[in-house]
Image (spheres, grey):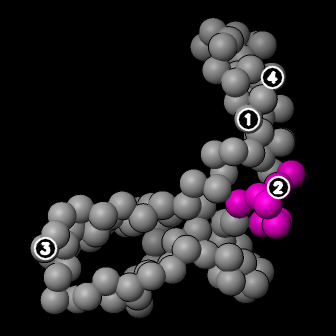
Amino acid sequence: MEYLVLGDVTLVLDTSTGLEVITDDRVDPTAREERLEAARLPFGTEAKQAALLRMKHAELAVRNRENGYWVARADPTVVTHAITGTVAVESLQSFAVPPSVKIW
């Protein structure tokens, strides 16, 4: 089975050798300072909401760009940045993906 994973999807494979989780963590190093600032503020405060908004804007500034992270959208070139691989079907016992993911 072939797979393709972008920043908005995680794939869990249950194979004869154990669980394998395939995820794209390239979003993690983005907006680092903004994320730290948001994390230190108390939930439910206006300051927390403002910090989360700054974090999201910083993340969006590097979405679908080199040295950033990639998510699916109407631009077909995004797939060239995906994490891809294969798993032997005979070793695959089951797998899990979010319900919005299409399986062909």
| Label 1, label 2: how far apart the Cα atoms are | 12 Å
Asked whether 49 or 7 is in front, the reply is 7
Q: Which residues are magenta?
A: 61-69
Closest to the camera, between mark 3 and mark 4, is 3
Q: Which residue is mark 1?
A: 32
Q: Which residue is mark 3?
A: 16
| Label 3, label 4: how far apart the Cα atoms are | 47 Å
Category of crowding for the residue at label 2, using alpha-carbon neighbours closer than 10 angstroms: few (below 14), some (14–19), many (at least 20)? some
What quarter of the picture does the C terminus occupy?
Answer: bottom left
* 66 drawn magenta: yes
Q: Position of residue 14 (x, y in %)?
A: 21, 68
Q: Which residue is mark 2?
A: 62
**Given the image, on which type of amino acid does mark 2 rest?**
Val
Q: Position of residue 5 (x, y in %)?
A: 52, 72
Q: Which residue is mark 4?
A: 50
- Secondary structure state at the residue bearing disc 2: loop
- Secondary structure state at the residue bearing disc 1: helix
In the rendered image, is residue 99 in sight? no
The residue at 63%/9% (across/down) is 42
Category of crowding for the residue at label 4, using alpha-carbon neighbours closer than 10 angstroms: few (below 14), some (14–19), many (at least 20)? few
Left or right of residue 44, residue 23 in this image? left
